[in-house]
Image: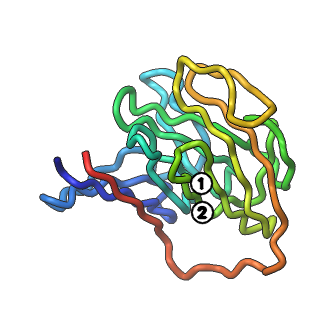
Amino acid sequence: SPVMLYVADRNNHKIRQIDMSTLQVTTIAGYSTAGFADTLTPTTVACLYYPSGVDVTADGKFLIISDETNNRIRALDLEGTSQLSTIAGNSVETTLDGVGTDARFDQPFGVKVSLDGRSIYAAEYGGNTIRRIGICLDSSSSSSSSSRSSSSSSSSASSSSSSSSHSSSSSSSSSSSSSRSS
């Protein structure tokens, strides 16, 4: 099975996939222009605005993306439809707990999926917080792993935060990466 490396090409507003056996680089999400669009139909071009962090879910089915300037956490289907969808947050730049798009993020910069696959941790650059998002990325499920629930055709999530006593430091890197074996 080839090993794939996923890169958030921040300044080009794209997600890249690198096949580590051939070093072939392929754009799998995003467009050269910053913007926002989920891929809801086959003709929709998914747009990102400074994607800054990526991680692969424990089952390898989804790539989780921190879409920094869109203030959203997004999921890219790696196995089926290649659909990019918002699982938490919306365009409002502030920190507020909530379910799905009712949650608010302030420049989410990095993401990490928990080893059990039940949570995503997102570091907010603007909000100086670490947020936990309970996830259920299976289309047949209708609730998140927290006491609050939400239903969606492709995902659901709830978010909670904890304040950080340390200020965020800016990164000189313009990309983030994560890998998986196929």
Q: Residue at x 66, y 57 (%)?
A: 122
Q: Residue furthest toward the front? A: 116
Residue 30 appears in view: no
Q: Name the residue under label 2.
A: 110
Residue 117 appears in view: yes
**N-terminal of the two: label 1 or label 2?**
1
Q: Mark 1 points at which residue?
A: 66
Query: In terms of depth relative to the viewer, which is nearer, 104 or 48?
Result: 104
Percent of width and height locating residue 74? 58, 43
Q: Is 49 situated above or below 82?
A: below
Q: Is residue 42 left or right of residue 119?
A: left
Percent of width and height locating residue 14? 45, 53
Query: In terms of depth relative to the viewer, which is nearer, 113 or 50?
Result: 113
For badge 2, the amino acid type reads: Gly
Tell me if label 1 and label 2 are in contact, CB under 8 Å: yes
The residue tagged with tag 1: helix, strand or loop? strand
